[in-house]
Amino acid sequence: MKFVKKYWFLILGLVFFLFLSYFHLGADPLFDWDEGIYGQVGRELKPPVWDLTWNSELWFEKPPLVPLLVKLGFILTPDLELGARLFMPLFGVLVIIYVYLLIEKFLLSKIANYSVIFFLLAPLFLSRSRMLNTDIILLVSLTAVIYYLLIFKEHLRKDQCSWSDYFKIVIASTLGFYSKGIIAALPWGIWFLYLLIFERDLLTEYWRQWLYLAVVIFVGFAPWHVYMTIKYGKDFWQVYLIEQVFVRTYKPIEYHFGGWLYYVKFLIENLRWVLLISFFGGVSFLRCFLKTKNKLFWLLLVWGGLVLGLFTLAKTKLFWYILPLYPVLAILFACFGRYLRKAYWPCLVLMVVWVALFNYPKFSQPVSPLNARNFIAESANDECEGEQMLVLVNASERRSKEILPKELQLSSSFIYGGAPSIVFYYDNRIKFFYQIEEFKEEWQKTEAHICAMIDKDDRRNLDIKSEPIIQKESWQLIKRIPPK
């Protein structure tokens, strides 16, 4: 009862968050791109789990944790969309908890409640907590690692470190490496930059402990990376590290570019007045720092500055990349509570009411139906008897491949046919074609039954006589039955 009395607001916020997150979680189809890709990789996962495939082809882009969670979700529920997303809200819960605990332990326990309000008013966080993605797990790893490192630092100073301090950091860090890959080193970049600038003596005096911690973490995430290196060598690292990290950093891959203010503009549009409160909370924290010299101020400055600077300098811009900044904004949002000491309860109640009004429309949103391509793909399961299906991608996707410069492409840019969820809903191998003549040649040469998905204008232009079995909007499913 004492625990419930102490954390009643956090518990109430988490219950509401879970209700909001799981409400109609499996109602909408998997969205392109990430959901369609990760859902299919998880579906194709077979022992040994080290090897990942998509559309029956080797897939090196991410580590195996998210596909493993997808596979487990499929085991726990027959609803494929729900199974694919089943564990995502739980990681959102962990983010809220770790930020709350960080504020409670290293700032002021009373204002920690406001951080819960922030996350319930952050559209990007709410949406990523419902979607199948790797970013929300990276966010858990980031906040947990920083939280446990702050405790580790305190114990180092007091010579009270135990094996559990190391264990918690290793688990939190390994979680990130097995979900998002090398970018999971982000909290370590934040931490060591902070130590280097503001607490350098901690690095030099306790270098053995840091070295030991680094070795144990390496042992934690090394097995899969070593296995992939031995089995696939440079082919693995070319995709996993060079393309997915380095190339995205210095090139605007697939025209995902933006100016210096790309993420600032997004935060303003996405958070609006919530961002303004975080700004004033930062002012409050600065005033507090000038009096108390709380070193968490410097850590948040390094954290926010490194994340915003790193992703601003990176050439490839995607709005969800800025999610690692949200814990900092949540902490600053909570710091605004210092201004509200005399009106703590009225303001908290007012914010709770606003959270309810902000999220109420989500309960009345209509369920998204399968789009035309996914509808045809799902229907083809009954018509094509488990055969490989040919797909001539639409004209706009073919045009994209023609005009996108080679230097702005990855090896995987055009393997997905512009709609990777088609493979998930067909549940069998699909062969995508970007050249009309290649499609026509494949269609005519086969001696077996073959199905194809094609745009009606392309079918007319190719003079294909087979009548469509299923049609929705401009997409058609056709089947060729060779003469006996």
Image: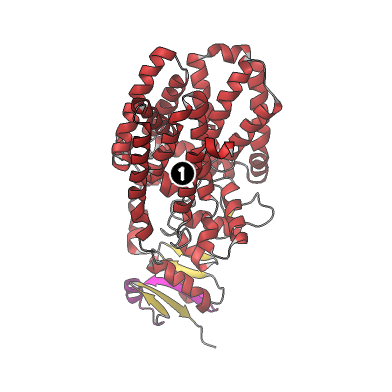
In the picture of the structure, the residue carrying the numbered disc 1 is 13
Segment colored magenta: 445-466
Q: Residues within 10 Å of mark 1 (few under 14, many from 20)?
A: many
Q: State the residue in front, 207 or 296.
A: 296
Residue 65, image x and y in percent? Answer: 59, 47
Image height check: is 331 above or below 176? Answer: above
Asked if residue 75 shows in the view, the reply is yes
Please state which amino acid type lies under the numbered disc 1.
Gly
Quadrant in which the N terminus appears: top right
Image height check: is 398 above or below 467? Answer: above
Q: Quadrant of residue 221?
A: top right
Q: Is residue 443 magenta?
A: no
Q: Residue at x 51, y 16 (%)?
A: 196
Q: Residue at x 44, y 52 (%)?
A: 20
Quadrant in which the C terminus appears: bottom right
131 sits left or right of 155 in the view: left
150 sits left or right of 307 in the view: right
Q: Secondary structure at mark 1?
A: helix
Q: Residue at x 42, y 41 (%)?
A: 119
